[in-house]
Image (cartoon, rainbow, N blue to C red):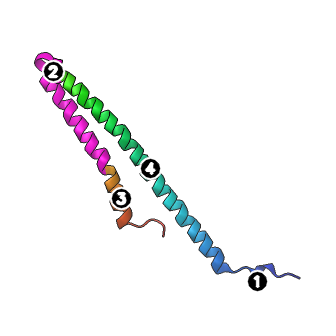
Amino acid sequence: MLDLLNSVDVTQLTSHLTLGAADGMSGLIESGKSIIKWLQRIAMVAAALAFCVGGYHLILGGERGRHKCIAWFVGGAAGLVIVMGAYALAEGVNTNIRFGS
């Protein structure tokens, strides 16, 4: 009769299970990076629109136009810096703290 329980090598089985867990974590990390890159593209468009609105307030805003445009310029620049820095932060965390293997 076949002895199926003794014919299975447990070390190979556990190495495949460990490798599968590491592959899942690396897939999750790559998904997070791609989401950040996608958000960066949207942030560039949003910052360009904010700068256009700020320019509109600066040129055609009248007496209070200069005060209104400052909020648009600072908000667009700060948002762009935050979103662009998110990828560098994610890379730094990934290199210093190893998730998975």
Identify the residue under disc 4.
Answer: 34
Per the model, the C-alpha gap separating discs 1 and 4 is 45 Å
Per the model, the C-alpha gap separating discs 3 and 2 is 40 Å
At which x and y percent is residue 77? 23, 39
- Identify the disc placed on residue 59: 2
Going from N to C along the chain, the mark reached first, 1 or 3, is 1
Per the model, the C-alpha gap separating discs 2 and 1 is 82 Å
Residue shown at 22% from the left, 30% from the top: 72
Q: Residues within 10 Å of mark 3 (few under 14, many from 20)?
A: some
Which amino acid, mark 1?
Asn
Identify the residue under disc 1.
Answer: 6
At which x and y percent is residue 45? 33, 34
Q: Residues within 10 Å of mark 1 (few under 14, many from 20)?
A: few
- Judged left or right of residue 46, residue 58 is left
At which x and y percent is residue 84? 30, 47
Residue shown at 76% from the left, 83% from the top: 6
- Identify the disc placed on residue 91: 3
Start-end of magenta stretch:
58-85
Name above or below for residue 46 compared with residue 83. above
